[in-house]
Every structure is written in C-alpha cells, then in structure tokens.
Image: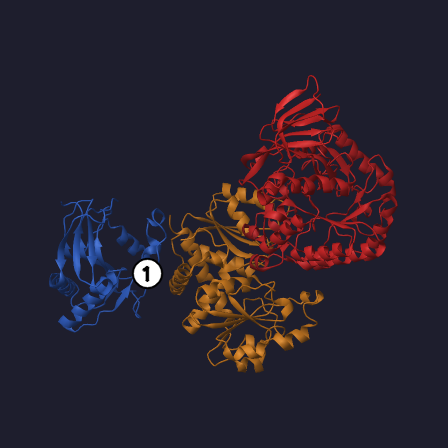
Chain colours: A orange, B red, C blue
Amino acid sequence: MIKHLRSAADLDADTATLILDTAAEMAALSGREVKKLPALRGRTVVNLFYEDSTRTRISFEAAAKRLSADVINFSAKGSSVSKGESLKDTALTLQAMGADAVVIRHSASGAPHRLANWVEGSVVNAGDGTHEHPTQALLDAYTMRSRLGRLDGLKVAIVGDVLHSRVARSNILLLSTLGARVTVVGPPTLIPLDLTDKAQVSYDLDAVLPDSDVVMMLRVQTERMQDSYFPSAREYSRRYGLDVPRLRKLPEHAIVMHPGPMNRGMEIAPEVADSPRSTIVEQVANGVSVRMAVLYLLLGGK
Amino acid sequence: MAYLLKGVSILGASPTDLYIADGVISDKPVDGAEVIDAAGLVALPGLVDVHTHLREPGREDAETVDTGSRAAALGGYTAVCAMANTSPVADTAGVVEQVWRLGREAGLVDVQPIGAVTVGLAGKQMAELGAMATSAANVRIFSDDGFCVADPKLMRRALEYVKAFDGVIAQHAEEPRLTEGAQMHEGEVSTRLGLTGWPAVAEEAIIARDVLLAEHVGSRLHVCHVSTAGSVEVLRQAKARGVRVTAEVTPHHLLLTDELAAGYDPVFKVNPPLRTRKDVEALRRALLDGVIDVVATDHAPHAVQDKECEWSYARPGMLGLETALPIVLSVFGPQWDLIADRMSIAPARIAGLDGHGGDLTKAGTPANLTLVDPSVQRVVDPAELASRSRNTPYAGMTLPGRIVATFLRGEATVLDGKAVK
Amino acid sequence: MAQPRADAPSKIILEGSDLHRVVDRIAHQILEKTSGATGTVLLGIPTRGVPLAHRLAARIHAFEGVEVPVGSLDITLYRDDLRLKATRALGRTELPPAGIDGLRVILVDDVLFSGRSVRAALDALKDLGRPSSVQLAVLVDRGHRQLPIRADYVGKNIPTALAESVKVALTETDGADEVRLIGGLS
C-alpha cells in the first residue's frame, strides 16, 4: 500500500481499484445500525484545514470516526496558524502529538508534498490550491462505477474551469489510470495550453454531449470574469452551462455530476441539478465511504 | 606581498611561471616572492558578476556584503555588481555609497553597486541616476531587478537619460500583467502541478520592446537573466541590426529545467523560472555564439524560513557565486577562452570595471585572477558554503573544478581553497 | 508465529471424498444438535469459511429438505493483529435478508487455531445484531488456543506442532479439495 495520497498520480490501477472495492464494503457496513468499526482504534487523524471547507472536513471526520480513530480538527482560524506559524512548525507540532495521518486542505498547490517531508505519518491531500483533490476523484469514480457498472471505456466530459480546477486535475489522472476516456470542455481561456495527453480537448459542449456517458460540471467562479476569462456570466452559461435542452442531448443512461458547491443557474440549471440523472447527493454520501477506504488502507496495516 | 605561481597554465596554455608584484602581473622574477605550486592549475582573469544580490542593507539574516564577498572570492570572483533591491532600496547616492564602502571594508572583491532605475523600485518615478553616477560608488549599471521597468515611456526616458554618463539600464524583462501570481514556467509541468504559469512570452515581449526602444534612442541596454529560446531569437535579430544590447544568462538556466519543480521544493523556485530542456539548449548555443554575452549568477540568498515553506509562499532565487564556475565547466568543458570572456572580460566591459578582465600574459595588468584545479570533482554540500544562506539547488550534485586561489590587485583573497580573511 | 518455508515437506491429511464425508458429518451433527436446523443461520468467515457454509447448507437441504440461510461475516476490521501486518483487503459481509436477531448463528471457518479470528468474529457479530445463540463449526481444529474458545462442530482434529501450518484448499476458491499439513515432519 502507498504511504501518502498527495496526488491521484500516487495511485496505479490496482491500488485505485482496491480503494474503490474497499469503499464498496465500507458503504455496505455503513448501512447498519452500529456504524462504528474498530479498525483504527488508537490511531490519530488530524484534519489540518487552511481553507474553509466544512463539507470536506466533515466527510473526513465522519470517515475517521466510523473507523474509531481519534480525530483532531486543526483549522486555520483561531489557532496558531492564523498567528503566522509556518507549515513546517505546525507539522513538527503535529508530529510531536503523534499524528498517524494528516488530512490537509491548503490554498497553496503542493502543500501536502511539503508536509510529507516534515511528518512521519501519512499525508492525505484534501485539496491543494489549483493542484489536486484526489479523494474527490476517487468518490467521483466510485459514483460512476456504481451507477454505470464500469469505468473502463467510459466516456467522461469534464466541463468548465479546468485551468483552476483541482477536481479536474485529479479526475483526469485517476480516470485515465482506470481506463476511462476524458474530454475536457470549456472556453479556451479556461483550458490549460499544455494539457496532458491523458485528455482530449473540446470547446464545443453540444458536440461532446451526445457521445458522453458522464458529464461532470465544474464550479465556475464569477470572479474569473473580472480577469477576462470570459465576458459575462450570461455568455458563459449560454455556451457552457448544462440546461434542460442540453440534458436531452445526453444518451439515456448518462449521468450528471458536480463536485459542489454549485452555482445554480450558472454552470448548471436547477432542473438539471435536481433531475434523477444527477448524482450530486450520492457523491456526498459516497465521499464518506471512499475516505474510510483511504484511511483504512493507509493506516490499517503495519 | 609578491607571488610566484609556479607552472601555472594561463587559460589552458602550456605551463609557465607567473609573477605577481605591486598589485600587477610582472614579467620579471621578484625576490622574496611566495611560491605557489600551480602545476595543473589554470589561471583565469578574476571572474566578474554583473548580477549579485548581497541583501545588505535590510536582510542581513540572508546575506551581508561581507559574507557575500567571501562567497564570491571562493567562487573565483574579484568583482561583483550588487543589485539595488535592498531595504532601503539603493536608489540614492547615500545607499550606493554605503554598499560600496561596506565592500571596501570586506576587502575580498570589488563590490560595485547597481542603482535603482526608479524610486523604491516602484516603476513610477526615475531615481536620481546622475547623483548615483557621480557618487563615490561611481554607478554605471541601473536596474530595478526583481521588477521590470514596465512603463514603456519611463523605460525610454531611463535609456536616454543614462547616455549622459555612459550608463546602462539592466532590464528584468517580465511583463507584469502576464505574470500575475506566476509561480513557475508556464507549460506541461505547471499545468500538472497546478502552479500559475510564467509564460515565456512575458519575457520575450519586454525584450522585443526594449531592443526597439534602445535602437530608437541609440542607447545601451543590458538584459538580465535571459531564460527562453524565444528571447535568444529576439536578441539575435537585434544584434544583427546593430542594436547596442548585451545579455546575461545564469548558471541555473544553463543547467536546470522546470521538471525540478515536481517535488514542490522551493529551492528550485527562481525568477525568471527554470524553463524547458529546449530553452536550456538554446541558451547554451547563444552563449557559445555570443548572442548572450555573459554568465551572471543572479546569486539570491534567502533565509531558511523563506524557502522552508509552501512553494507559492517562498521567495524566488538561488545561490550562485560559489558554484557558477563549476556549472559552466560542467556544461561547456575546459573551453578556457570562452569561460574567461563570458565570465570576466565581457562582464567587466559591460560594468565598466577597468582593471578586471585583463590580459594575464601582459606585464602591468592588474593582478585580478583566480586559479582553478579542473581535475577535482566536488560534491556540493550546502553546509560548506560561505554564503549566510543555504538555498543552493545543486546540493548533492557532483561538479568539476575547485577554486584554489583568488587574487585581488595582487593580494590573495583565497589560498588553498580557503578565504584568507 | 513462525511460518514454514514454502518448500517445506507437507502431507495431505484429507482430500476429495474424505473431505466431503467430513462436511456431511458436520451437517448431520448440526441437524442433530439444533433439532433440524430450525431458526439457524450459517455465517461463513472469508475466505474459505464462506464456501464451507454454503456446502453445509446444501448438505442440510439434501438430507432433510431444510433451507438454512447463509451469509458471510468479514472480520478484517475487527482483528487484533491488523497493525502487525501489511494492510489487508476487506472481505464481504453479507447477512441473509432475515438478519440474525433472535436466531442461532453458526460461524463457519476452515481452521480453528489460536481462537483470535473467532474472537474477532464475535465482536463483529455484536455490531450487527443480537443472535439468540452463537455456535462455531470448523473443518479442522489444530489446537494451540490462545483464548478460551472451543468449537461446537469439528470436522477433524489434527494435532500439530506450532511450527507447522495447516492449509485448507477448496474447489470454489483453490480448484481442489484438500487439507495439507506443512512443515515439521521430515
């Protein structure tokens, strides 16, 4: 088993599949009355959050607690972090406290890589800057697999602000590792110039939809407008928003995903977000199972 | 003190005996000269760096004029040009004279201050360039390095203004709007790492503009740390047209690439950023064929806390003085005439430093020189560096060449690989 | 615990029809001791306890026409030696639709040794519901208990040395039916 989960690139196909399979068992166990499992009793998981993200923190916290780990939440607000303590000093503190795993959310790309140099325990990336969010990609893959039965050969369109999206980066890596075919779609200003060969690029959402099994809408921040990435929210929404007429262009079986939080009316119409094709609520539930699997596989053994 | 360098090879020529007396090269044996066995050692004119950050005044925790001078002498340098981005900024006669005086007191290399082009490096108002030029520091190079003189009108005026005292503007070519938030070279690696890209065109566009401005007003322009293949092409065309432009390249841009950012270790963060293999190759060719005139270190010491942190919070810059010659040797091999020209003769000419970069075979040449043992391979150990900082990207790398001795106006600053003071 | 080397000498203790007869005998004993297997659930412990549980259910059905519900109970997350070894993949836990509350649960495993797996299974069971009673059926009991645990149904008692190991193979998981004693006997 790997020691850290800093990037989806840390996962080969076998390891990624093991995580998804383990998550499926965890999901089955979560259906019962007694949800707690003793596997990580005596282990300490620290949630080190430099960015506000209640949903992700709660998801990791629930996952760790269901496995009986001790959870310490260390958030930037109201702690020594806001008093300017460096990441390295914080890491040494966590090390002294005997953290077996540190789940880190940070606005700086690569912060989990830095942290891994300074702590002995495992580091799990819960989102770093515009770099990656590997557990989100795992829960997305898990959701696709449970809805559509497979990942190999699946055609996945990732739509929106790919340039700034850590979700897109992790998904491109993980999905291509697991045999899916990814096409990124968005205005050229929001698609990196030198994208990896692991994904196709298209600027035309209507052309891509009829041949997609999955369409994943990314959150688009309206602030991007001020930086000339696109002229207006209205134009963005017209060209790249998923509305009902566009939903009809998808094949019968195709699903609609969104990592949240959504801008309803911007990248996704409310009717689409609430349609039965949408997996948005499932994604949240699957997040806990996937994170349980990750924590168990990183910390469960020797 | 007089010296006899016994069996020394001047620029790789056959071994000879070289006498140093009264601060100059002597063609006659001198009585009582200290004999240095220089068999197997190569004598080069003392190296000259047109781009050094000494951090004093302001960040003496990262480097001082004294520690930086020591690092320079150990690297084979006899003169360094100290960049203006100190705190306070070297934008007045007072500050440049202070730096110049500190250099004299350290006494290990000639420290030639560079003056800021604009007040506070803010890019708004021209600093008192004339006052700095006529100060004791005798400033000839002006640069806002760290920042680009982005305003085209201000750049034009500065280029024109320094003609009165044969000054030169050294431009940090970086279009600021194209590099907002930039962290590393824009390309496949920056996309993968999720770090905001610093596109090559942001450098090339400024160089293209500035060579046209220099041509228009008939002024001298010097381009700092050229880092892209595209910049080389712009410079090649400008030089072919006769524009009075010179350019420098750093040792790190001649050796390292953006792939090194993959582990997010900020020791590899530098501005301009490490580029691609293709850029490295173009820069090497440009230095060989003279489109790029000099190797300059852009020695940029940083305190530990400014590098032991997240990549995007880290300050850009790398140490360079003590490893520059070994890097150049490793890239180009023992091409001693080339090395002497690009690391001593041409930089001395650009900086107007008479007495440096002289002909060691001629009697009367000021005895500014360094002795190199090219047969030694050394592993770079950050702990052994004389700089106050440790941010070398070459830690653990095996590099050829050891600086055995350095002489400043006939006085040894380094002997047997150790600083004399 | 010391494991015998891969090339250590080994001896077949049971195979083919002998093994089938042993399973038949356990099925008969279950029918006997549970008054016809009423109110009973068989829970196999992965990996080889699961096919064994299915075989027992099939034989009980063949002998008396009774349908005994079968499930599986993975104990990985309850093991007390998790941290002593590399992370293990999870097995499946699947209870029959009627659950286990108020029923007699018979845990089924291939080999009874230290008793620690059974302890883990009892812990796991406790989190899943409240059976009226719990029994244990094993194909082989090789001794060396480290906990106060005994089996209600034993296919075969095999006296072993600690340095030896007992390896059960089943057609469903390994392609053949055999019980092999490995090491210790040159």
* SS under mark 1: loop
Output the chain of dot 1: C
Which is more toward the observer, B306 or B240? B240
Report whether residue C163 is seen.
yes
The residue lying furthest to the top in this view is B32
Q: Where residue B267 sits: x, y (%)? A: 60, 45
Report whether residue B269 is seen.
no
Q: Does B164 sit above or below residue A288?
A: above
Which is more toward the observer, B405 or C30? B405
Q: Does B227 sit above or below residue A169?
A: above
Look at mark 1 in the image and give the residue it sits on. C91
Lateral position of residue C6 relative to residue A160, left or right: left
Residue at 27% x, 50% y is C116
Which is more toward the observer, A29 or B361? B361
Which is more toward the observer, B304 or B285? B285
Q: Where residue B245 sits: x, y (%)? A: 76, 51
In the rendered image, which quarter is residue A168 located in? bottom right
In the image, what residue type sits under mark 1? Gly
Q: Where residue B47 sits: x, y (%)? A: 69, 37
Q: Does A74 sit above or below residue A215?
A: above
